[in-house]
Amino acid sequence: MTRRTEMLNDELHAYIDGELDGEERAAVEAAVAADPALDETVTLYRADMAKIASIYGGDLSEPLPRRWIATIENSARRTTWRNVGLSAVAMAATVVLVFGLTTALRQSTAPGKGDIVAEALAVRNNEVGPRTVISVRSVAEAQAQNGAMTKSLAARVKVPDLSRMGYRLVGIESFDSPAHAYELIYRDADARVFTLYMRRPLGKVRFDQFAEKGLRICVWQDEQVAMVMAGKMPVAEMQHLASLVYNGVEL
């Protein structure tokens, strides 16, 4: 994928989410009108958004857990968030990942070497061997792992239920290196894979969403747990999956 293609993909998402000004919007509309493939992409993105809206019944917001709201507010007082204004932080503290926040939450730079995203992608791509692999066939089998994850990560976490967005947990992998970590593997009816990588935090509070190696990635890290969510999907779908994770991962 070329740099121009990556830029155009972000422009398309911004266009569909209604974030472009008149001149930028006109430029994207001209490009779409001249390219049938782009026109089809826009149609598919909008179909995804309509599907998500129907699943959520028109309610496209989810509250953050109270502890996470406090983390965001405290971090905003202590530090300056790159690419995120104070108004966006205040909005994120009360409403999670609604369509209008796409630009505010988008991280424009790729993660550096040694970053938790690199860890998560290495795990997702099977470049790191797991200590254990557990196939999950039922909700009960998934819930049976909550205690082990809580003990290993020293954080009160559980397996999030993503069935509302059509994703079913099919496997859990645990890792000892470079740290105790878990990868939760979900699939939807179209066999698309969504992964949730969890470990103890590496550093300061972090909240990013960006495109990396053909994947849409969302990162949440606070004082208790660090998570990387990854999958091939539009921005809006990742936003709502992340919302379900946020509200479903705490015991």
Image (cartoon, rainbow, N blue to C red):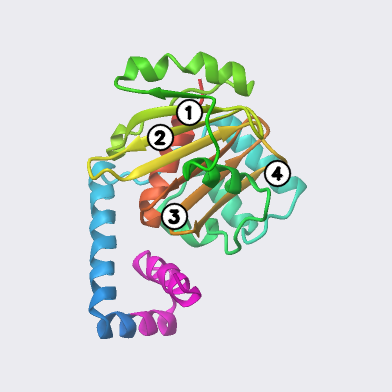
Circle 4 Cα neighbour tier, 10 Å, few/some/many (<14 / 14–19 / ≥20): some
Return the x and y of residue 103 as percentages of the image width and height.
50, 62
Question: In percent of the image, x 48 and y 28: which residue is there?
Answer: 173
In the rendering, which numbered label is found on residue 173?
Answer: 1
Which residue, given by chain and number where applicable, does mark 4 sit on? 75
| Quadrant (top left, top right, bottom left, bottom right) of the N terminus | bottom left
Which is in the foreground here, disc 3 or disc 4?
Answer: 3
Q: Which residue is mark 3?
A: 215
Along the polypeptide, which appears first: circle 3 or circle 4? 4
Between the C-alphas of marks 3 and 4, the distance is 27 Å
- Which residue lies at the image location 38% right of the left edge and 70% below the top edge? 12
Q: What separation in Å lies between label 3 and label 1 (alpha carbons)? A: 20 Å
Q: Quick check: 217 above or below 134?
A: below
- Please name which of the two marks, 2 or 1, marks the residue nearer to the observer: 1
Whether residue 112 is visible: yes
Residue 125: percent from the left, percent from the top? Answer: 47, 45
Question: How far apart, in angstroms, are the residues tagged by discs 3 and 2?
Answer: 15 Å
Q: Is residue 116 magenta?
A: no
Magenta-drawn stretch, dominant element (helix, strand or loop): helix
